[in-house]
């Protein structure tokens, strides 16, 4: 992993870490991508949330690895994927990283599973690669105005500061552990579901040179995620939309996506919040294993 001296502190049993090199002729705009691989069976690609990484699925992977070959990607610039100076972190650029994983590994009959940011990318990637994607499970897709700022007052204040002109760069460089904990715990009803060792892992990967620029770009890319909704009707694969009852999305946001994807299955998980993979991984695992 070219620009990282730090290494993951967490290990998910049964997984191995791999990388995908930039493609020849990419002109330096692509970085090395890191992913975790586990299990046997048809390919299943996991796409994580904003400001997290492949370890977001630490509890889900063991529940599905007997029926799928699981590929959990660190999206471009996140986790331990390479940070490329000047790279874009808008939806099309992030989607390109997902498509690199699928095409470089020559995966077919793929089940795409994404949560939050990853839920948007699962849908738009399926629109781009209909010949390779078998099914999409989009969990709490992050495609509505304000995003994480809806989770709590502290999130609204901090994220507003990060995306602000001028001072935003300085704020993005400061990521105190208590503040990140409070922001991300806004995605779970049971605060214990956001474990301390996972928080430590996120803080470690976030200390890589250049990551504050990545984080700031990600928080500012909400318009591109909202715009990506226009691609949803292009998806030809079967889709299952999964929402936590207490997700940051509003009922109107969910209904809007149901109208864009009228043939999609729809599940609302009682009592669940935004990070279902952390709080209720068995729900997603049951949906996936039932159709493996």
Image (spheres, rainbow, N blue to C red):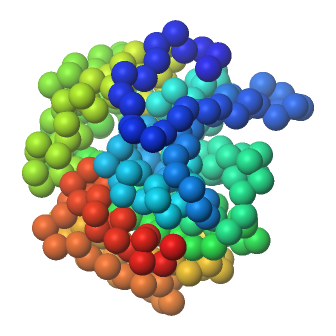
Screen quadrant of the N terminus: top right
Residue 229 seen from this side? no
Residue sitting at 30 percent across and 36 percent down? 159
Residue 175, percent from left and from top: 28, 21
Give the side of residue 212 with respect to residue 130, left or right.
left
State the image quarter where residue 204 is shown: top left
Instruction: Give the residue at the far right of this rendering.
Output: 25
- Above or below 169: residue 243: below
- Above or below 205: residue 42: below
State the image quarter where residue 108 is shown: bottom right
Count the numbered circles shown. Answer: 0
- Above or below 152: residue 161: above
Residue 88 seen from this side? yes
Front-lying residue, 260 or 285: 285
State the image quarter where residue 202 is shown: top left
Give the side of residue 224 with respect to residue 281, left or right.
right
Instruction: Give the residue at the far bottom of this rendering.
Output: 263
Residue 272, percent from left and from top: 19, 64
Residue 232, percent from left and from top: 57, 73
Residue sitting at 68 percent across and 28 percent down? 31
Residue sitting at 18 percent across and 51 percent down? 188
Give the side of residue 73 with respect to residue 252, left or right.
right
Give the side of residue 283 with respect to residue 219, left or right.
left
Residue 36, percent from left and from top: 53, 39
Front-lying residue, 261 or 159: 261
Residue sitting at 63 percent across and 49 percent down? 98
């Amino acid at each position: 992993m070219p620009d990282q001296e730090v290494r993951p502190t967490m290990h998910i049993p049964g997984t191995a870490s791999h990388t995908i090199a930039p493609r020849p002729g990419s002109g330096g705009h692509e970085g090395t991508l890191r992913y975790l691989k586990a299990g046997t069976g048809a390919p299943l690609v996991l796409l994580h949330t904003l400001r997290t990484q492949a370890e977001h699925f630490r509890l889900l992977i063991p529940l599905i690895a007997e029926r799928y070959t699981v590929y959990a990607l660190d999206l471009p610039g996140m986790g331990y994927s390479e940070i490329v100076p000047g790279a874009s972190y808008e939806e099309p650029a992030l989607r390109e990283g997902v498509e690199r994983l699928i095409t470089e590994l020559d995966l077919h009959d793929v089940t795409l599973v994404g949560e939050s940011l990853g839920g948007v990318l699962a849908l738009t990637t399926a629109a781009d690669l209909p010949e390779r994607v078998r099914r999409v499970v989009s969990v709490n897709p992050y495609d509505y105005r304000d995003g994480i700022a809806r989770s709590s007052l502290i999130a609204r204040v901090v994220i507003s500061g990060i995306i602000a002109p001028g001072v935003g760069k300085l704020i993005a460089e400061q990521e105190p552990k208590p503040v990140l904990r409070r922001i991300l715990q806004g995605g779970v009803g049971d605060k214990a579901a956001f474990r301390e060792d996972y928080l430590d892992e996120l803080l470690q990967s976030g200390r890589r040179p250049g990551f504050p620029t990545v984080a700031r770009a990600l928080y500012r890319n909400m318009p591109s995620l909202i715009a990506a909704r226009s691609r949803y009707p292009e998806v030809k694969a079967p889709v299952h939309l999964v929402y936590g009852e207490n997700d940051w999305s509003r009922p109107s946001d969910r209904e809007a996506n149901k109208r864009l994807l009228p043939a999609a299955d729809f599940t609302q998980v009682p009592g669940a919040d935004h990070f279902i993979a952390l709080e209720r991984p068995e729900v997603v695992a049951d949906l996936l294993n039932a159709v493996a």
